[in-house]
Amino acid sequence: MRVIGLAGWSGAGKTTLLKGLIPELRRRGLSVSTIKHAHHAFDVDVPGKDSYEHRAAGAEQVLVSSANRWALMTELRGAPEPPLAELLGRLNPVDLVIIEGFKRDSHPKIEVHRAANGKPWLHPEDPRILAVASDVAPPGLPHADIDDIAAVADLVLRLAEPV
C-alpha cells in the first residue's frame, strides 16, 4: 500500500481535486481509498436512526451493514484521537491511500494552493511537501496545474510512498 497526502488551507480545492483524482487513478487501474481529517465535530449518522440511538445510549462501537455497504462507527468518549498510522492500519489493502488533511503528519504530501484564497504557502515550513498542485507555480518544487487532473495524478503516482 502506498500513501500520499493533499495538504492545503480550507478553500484551496482539496476535495474538488480529490473528486477528480479518484476516478482518474481508477481508470489507470489502481484501487484507491481515502482518509479525511475533520477539524470539527462531525457525524455520519442521523438522529432517530437505530444506529445513532445505539451510540447515544453509550455503545463504544456500532457496525451497520447492508447489501450495499457497511460502516463501523467508534466513539472515542474522551480518548485521544488515533494517530494516522493506526487509522491507516484499519483500512483494507489497496494500491493507494490519499490522505486529505493531517497536514502536520510526516507522510509525503502535495500542497493544494489557490492564489485567490490569499493564504500563505505551506511548503516552506514542511519538508514532506514534495510537489504543488496550484494555479501558480512556486519555484523549486514540481508543479501541476490544479485543474489538470492527469498531471496531478502523475505527481501522485511518482511521489506516493509505501506505508
Image (spheres, rainbow, N blue to C red):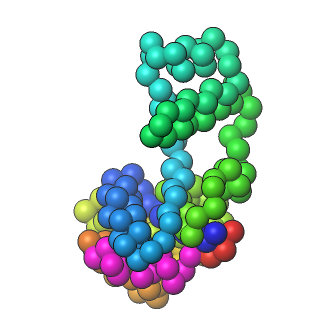
The residue lying at 45 percent from left, 69 percent from top is 111
Residue 38 colored in magenta in the image: no
Task: Please give left or right for residue 22 compared with residue 99 in the image.
Answer: left
Residue 141 seen in the figure: yes
- Residue 8, given in percent of the width and then of the height, sits at 44, 61
The image quadrant of residue 132 is bottom left
Question: Magenta span: helix, strand or loop, mainly?
Answer: helix
Asked if 51 appears above or below 48 in the picture, the reply is: below
Q: Nearer the viewer, residue 40 or 70?
A: 70
Q: Which residues are magenta?
A: 148-160
Residue 131 seen in the figure: no
- Residue 84, given in percent of the width and then of the height, sits at 66, 54
**Which quadrant of the figure contains the N terminus?**
bottom right
Asked if 138 appears above or below 9 in the picture, the reply is: below
Asked if 1 appears above or below 136 in the picture, the reply is: above
The residue lying at 26 percent from left, 71 percent from top is 147
Q: Nearer the viewer, residue 50 or 114?
A: 50
**Which quadrant of the figure contains the C terminus?**
bottom right
The residue lying at 51 percent from left, 84 percent from top is 158
Asked if 43 appears above or below 126 in the picture, the reply is: above
